Image (spheres, rainbow, N blue to C red):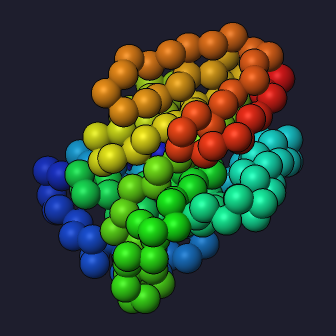
Amino acid sequence: MTTILDLKPLIKLTSEDFYKLCQINRDIPLELSRNGELIIMSPVGGERGNQEANLITDVSIWNRQNKLGFVFSSSTIFDLANGGKRSPDVAWIKKERWESLTLEQRQKFPPICPDFVIELRSPSDRLKPLQDKMQEYLDAGLKLGWLINPQDNNVEIYRTNQSVEVLSLPVSLSGEDVLPNFDLLVE
C-alpha cells in the first residue's frame, strides 16, 4: 500500500531537502511527485519482487551484450527536471547521457530522466497514480516506458509525443530505437 502525504500547503521540499530526508530515513522508500506530494511506498511481496528482478535481469543482459548504457534498480531515485523525484522499477540511461553527469551528480539522486523505464503494478497499487508517474517521466524527457499491469492483463506503452498504446497480455514488447534489438515477452 502506498501512502501519499500532501506537503505543498505547508512546505516545499527542495531537491537537497528531499535528499537529506531520504538519507535520514534510509529504511523508508520515498518518492516526491512533481506536485509536492511525498509518497511512502511499501515493500513488495515475493512474487512481485521476483518479477521485478527478472525484468532487471533481462534489461541488464541485453545491456551487457550491447554496452549502450546503464541499468538501474528500483532503489535509484532520479531527480527529474519537472520537480519529481522518482524511482522506477527498472530504468536505463544511454551511456553518453549518464557519463555527461558529474561524479557528485551520479552519487546522489541523479538529475536526469531515464531514457527507458518499466513500472510493474503490484496488487496493492492503484492504476491512476502509476499512470500519472509515467506521464511525469514523459514530461521530463522519457523516450520509452512500459507500465506492466498484470491485474488488468495489459501493458501500457508510453512514447515521446505519442498517445499511450495499450496491448493485451501475453505480448512481445520491443525496445524500438531506444533499446535496439531488445525484446521482452510479457505473460
Work out whether 136 lies above or below 57. above
Q: Find residue 40 and report its horizontal and vertical position in percent.
A: 49, 54
Task: Locate residue 62 relative to residue 143 in the image: left or right.
Answer: right
Question: Is residue 53 in view?
Answer: no
In the image, is 127 to the left or to the right of 37? right
- Residue 53 x %, y %: 80, 53
72 versus 181 height, above or below: below
Work out whether residue 142 or residue 34 is closer to the camera in this orientation and state it: 142
Where residue 119 appears, as percent x and y from the top left, is: 59, 40
Q: Residue furthest top?
A: 168
Where is residue 4, by image quadrant? Answer: top left
User: Which quadrant of the figure has residue 179?
Assistant: top right
Q: Residue visible at 27% across and 71% down?
A: 15
Q: Quadrant of the C terminus?
A: top right
Q: Residue at x 69, y 11 (%)?
A: 168
Give left or right: position of 179 versus 100: right
- Classify the position of the N terminus by image quarter: top right
In the rendered image, is residue 50 in sight? yes
Q: Residue furthest bottom?
A: 103
